[in-house]
Image (cartoon, helix red, strand yellow):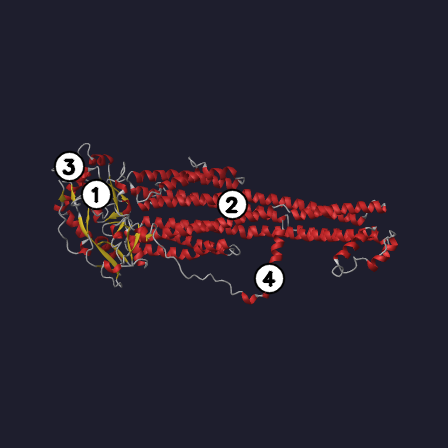
Amino acid sequence: MSVTTGPRAVGRTTPAGAPLASPPGAAPPADLAAGLRRTANTTPGRLSIAMVGLVVLSLLTGVIGLISVSGRASTLDDLTNHREPVSAAAQQIYRSLSDADATAADAFLTSAVMPADLRSRYQTDIAQAGSALAVAATDSGGVTDATAPLSQLSTGIPVYTGLVERASANNALGYPIGSAYLREANNLMTTSLLPAAQHLYKIDTDRLVAAQDDATSFPWFATLLVVALLVALIIAQRFLRRRTNRVINVGLLVATIAVVVAMLWSATGLVLETVHVANGRSAGSDPGATLAQIRTKALQARTDEMLTLVARGGQDYNGQYQTLATEIGGEDGTGGLLGQVHAASSDDTMTNQIGASITAAKSWFGLHTQATKANGGGDYPTAVNITLGSGVKGSPNEAAAFDQVDTTLNQAIGQARIDFTNQTNAASGWLTALPIGVLVLLVLAAAGAAVGIWQRLREYR
Amino acid sequence: MKTRRIVPLVGIALLATLAAGCASTSGPVNLAIVNKVAPPVPGGIKIGKAAIPPAAAATPNCGDPTASLRPPAVMPTPGQMPTGSTMAKIQARGYLIAGVDQNTDLFGYRNPKDNTIEGFDIDMVHDVAQAIFGDPNKVVFKAITSAQRIPVLTGPNPAVDLVARTFTINCARLQQVAFSTVYFQASRQVLVPKTSTVQNFAQLGGKKVCATTGSDSLGQGQGQANAPIPVAVNDWSDCLVMLQQGEVDAVSTDNTILAGMETQDPNTKIVGPSIAPEPYGIAMPKADNDFVGFVNGVLQQIRTNGSWTASYGTWVQDKLGATPAPPPPAYEN
């Protein structure tokens, strides 16, 4: 273990007794540190350390980069394959249940025996809620919060349908207790099932937003490693140039280029990915959430006007209706949430669909005013006919106007889903080859560094 | 940032190793077994203490509560109500507004077949409309709950002109509203499932007894040893729903309402002697003395012209037995 600076001497002594060669576990830490310090005082020693350091740092950066980018890619997959569909399914559950409840009330107002079209609509709603529940339930894993609303829904829906059937059996016999069963069913729906569906939707939407945040966060750790690696490569090259007077070390140059390419590629890929995810949010999931909110409010308002008629003045739901209508369309039907989402929409198809919703909403609100006026003036049958659209053909039909609102909103929600999925898939596209690319480039960098320094180190032998 | 992913990965790997090591201690996956489920209930239900209506602070003795105002000597011709009278205001509006029930079979219910509201109480309202307009159908029915009967008649702008909804006349209610003479004499009894061994109200101690919020039946037997557990709901039909679902043991109210329930469910029976007499009157705002007298005049007409007997025959005879004479009016002046 001579301390001479002569290259050959050290070259010979190092394999014999350098602590580097001894198994690290065997040497006491103090000896190891002292050995390293002695090695670091010699040029070949320093070169050896630099070589090992650069190779380790390159491989580490490659692995971290691989994990980081592929983690992000799997987050994106998760977004389009789990988070978004589950959140859309939760929204669908709410919509179907709410419509089933309104349809049951509607049928009750129409006649003793549920008319065929209403029965089929009610049955479709219940079936749709059930199948959307199956989709939503596939993904409650790991989120204990979601278990409660899911079990509330899956145990409550059969009870609800039982009550509705009992109501309609009694109704068919002309017994007023039928309406009592219907009210009990409505009570179950509004106090238990709809809040559970709303809760589930909120959980799923929050998870969607969290996943989006995850997919657009800045990769601090990987960035730090790359910058450190680049700095280390530059320092190594400067050191070699000073010691050897050779301007270019091909191995280290290749390593540097590989790292720079990896850095530029990741930076471009990640920036573009982030932009697409952000677009998917601003053009897809955000307007989708607002549209879902509008649809929910519209359904509540529709149920309120139905209940006003069922209650026959017993309970006033009209105040709730007015509040909801103002939230949906503002004072004149063009403002409110519909106006906001219309103004913010950047997709022409969606803008047109929302425009159609606004037109339909205006007509719905107008007809509601007519029906309220008829009811207030004592003309209950006309109020029922307008609200249910059960009058003669061509007479005012609020049900049709509301259905138009619901349909166009559903189309716009569908368009928002398409925009979200397209953008998120595009984001995913930028990450397709990146994980492997980064790994290959950094393995190349490790090899370059090893070969480059090894050439110089050989000269000391 | 993806350290967030690595850390859990390492954690999972460690846990997996640990779990493999002590797999024998973890049981099978929880199958979410349900042991108990809350039955569906009608909206606005109250059970126990919350169901008992606040005791009317020392109801003053009002003598005979069924004594009402004497009708005018000559009833005005329909369509020509005296100027300035309450009836003239109603006539000017074009329709009578009546607070009624749409859930009680026989007395006030919505017929699902054609959406009209029908029943004995409803017949009384049509008779009043006939006397004002000469047209029994100039009525707007507002379906109200039992608890809404007094609120819709009080305040500066009462929501309805009158309430005809199995409304028992008593001194406490007379403090807030005015009543017509008695148009129907009911009595309070108990409805139980046919399989029940209960034979009278006294045997309902500790059992759940249903009635509508604000109903006198809820206070019945309270404060005594072995009192029943009162359950309050919005409408009488909600009580039958609860009885059918096995969530209450009995319904306690007027035999008229119970008869309607028995009609809808042949698995129930009315038991026991009359617990209390329940004289029904049409309620009106306290200020409308002229209208009270007018309605009493209408009731007097239908007692004598066979219309009362016809209504009884249509709605109640099959359930409560042979038609009695209409309840005689009592007047305070």
| Residue type at tag 1 | Leu
Q: Residues within 10 Å of mark 2 (few under 14, many from 20)?
A: many
Mark 2 residue element: helix
Seen at 54% across and 42% down, the residue is: A283
Residue occupied by mark 1: B174
Residue nearer the viewer, A317 or B153: B153
In the image, what residue type sits under mark 3?
Thr
Q: In this rendered view, identify the residue nearer to me: A255 or A335.
A: A255
**What separation in Å lies between label 4 and label 2 (alpha carbons)?**
43 Å
Determine which residue is flagged by label 2: A415
**In contact (CB < 8 Å): disc 1 and disc 2:** no
Is residue B112 something that shows in the picture? no
Tell me whether marks 1 and 2 sit on the same chain.
no
At label 4, which amino acid type do we have? Ala
Mark 3 nearby-residue class (10 Å; few <14, some 14–19, many ≥20)? few
* Left/right of residue A45 with respect to residue B154 in the rendered view: right
Instruction: Tell which tag, 1 or 2, sits nearer the viewer.
Output: 1
Q: Which residue is mark 3?
A: B77
Q: x, y percentage for residue A367?
A: 37, 39
In percent of width and height, residue A358 lies at 45, 39
- Report whether mark 4 lies on the same chain as mark 1: yes
